[in-house]
Structures are given as structure tokens and as C-alpha cells.
Image: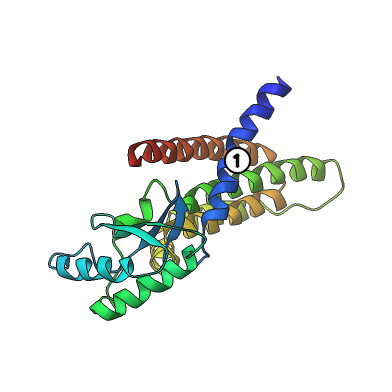
Amino acid sequence: MLRTLGALASQIVAPVAAAAQSIVGLGRRRAWVSEGRAHVEVRGVHQPGSEEAGERIVRWLEKVPGVVWVEINAVVGRVVIGHDPDLVGIAGLVGAVEDAEADTGLDEEPFAAVSASHPDNPAKVIAEATMLGANSTGAAIAMGARLLPLPALPPSVPALVSTGESVSRVRRPLETRIGKTATDLLFGLSSAMANTLAQRPASLLAESGYRFCLLRETLAARRGWARWAR
């Protein structure tokens, strides 16, 4: 059984670590490297009438030293770039995309809304893994705290966090400002902390099981996209 659990853990940890290494940062523009290609969000190319601007962006990026080929996927608002990582890294490519947007007048346009749900986006993998870890750790702490004479928060505190997550008046401004994945992570970590301080291991274990299933689903979607992309 231990061997099975170890194998299962390695199937989760390895992709999560690879996803973490591929992320440029926590800025508003999503960008990562996957399967030897750079994926960078581009403003405005998903909008009707932006075809000429998209072609100009492709020609701009093709002139960057180290870039081998460039392809725009306007539907998801991204540019996919084959490049030599020894000559240009993902940070340099993001800078080139920003320069190309400014040159074509797209630098004030929005990103495609569907871009946030791209199955190859590693941020979702890392968020689910983080919430799984937070709830699992919290369950262990909560069970230990019950054996000690430590005060616990009232159950109304975790309930308040859960209510805030489900109320659109609270959630929608956060999603607009920081994005859906970051909002999910914020509420997920807040809920894990509240349940830990309230010493509710059962709730934390249930949430851990839920996050484990979501993480496996997200990894499966990412593998499916990688097979299709090849």
C-alpha cells in the first residue's frame, strides 16, 4: 500500500513541480513554457478585425533572435512560440510581445476571457496542489489541537468564509481584479485556515479529498492538451 501511495504521490508532485518551474511570475499576463514551446497571452487578438494586427505581431516576434517559429491562436488569445532557450527565455519573449502590442496599438485592449481556462495553464495545477496541501496539513494540525487544551474558533467563522465565497457581490470584484484561479486560491486557503483554527478535521479531510480529485482532473486535462498539441 505504501508503494502505491508513493507512486501516486510522484504522479502528482512531478507535474506540479514542472508547472511551477514554467511560470514566469504572478503578473496579470499568463505565460509559460510547455513541451518546448512558449505560450504567451496577447491582448486584443481575439477580437474581430484584429487579424492584420495579429500578423504584424507574428512578423515582429519572428525577428527576435532565437525565435524559430510563431503561431497565434486568436480563439484563446495566445501566441505560441518555438524558440531556442539558450538565446531567448520566456521573460524575453513576454517583453517582445508587450513591445509588439504597443507597436500595433493593442496594448490597451483586454485579454481573451477564455484564456483563463486554458487547459495547459500551470497556475491551475499549482493552485489545486497548494489547496490540497493546506487542507491536508490543516487536518493534521486540527487533530493534534484537539488533544491539547487549546481554544478553537467558533464554527461560524469557517461558515462566514464559505458564505463569502458563494456570494457574487463579494467574489465578482475579486475575480475581476486578480482572476478566477487566484480568487479560488484565496478563498481555498482562507477556508483551510479557518477550519484549522476551528479544529474541524472532518471538514479539512473532506476538502482534501475534493481537492485531490480536482488536481487529478486538472493534470489529466493538461496531459490531454499536450497530446493534442503535439
Can you see residue 94? yes
Residue found at the far top of this picture: 1
Which quadrant of the structure image shows residue 10?
A: top right
Residue pictured at 52% horizontal, 65% vertical: 26
Given residues 99 and 167, the one toward you in this image is 99
Please tell me which residue is depicted at 23% across the width and 54% down the height of the picture: 75
> On the rendered structure, is 87 left or right of 40?
right
Q: Where is residue 62 in the image (x, y as percent from the top left)?
A: 31, 66
Viewer can see residue 28: no
For the point 12% across and 68% down, the residue is 49
Within-10-Å neighbours for mark 1: few <14, some 14–19, many 20+: few
Quadrant containing the N terminus is top right
Reading the image, the residue beneath label 1 is 14
Front in this rendered view, residue 39 or 28 = 39
* Near-viewer residue (90 or 114): 90
| Residue at the image point whose x is 66% and y is 54% from the top | 193
- Residue 179, by quadrant, is bottom left
Count of picture labels: 1
Q: Percent x, y for residue 208?
A: 60, 39
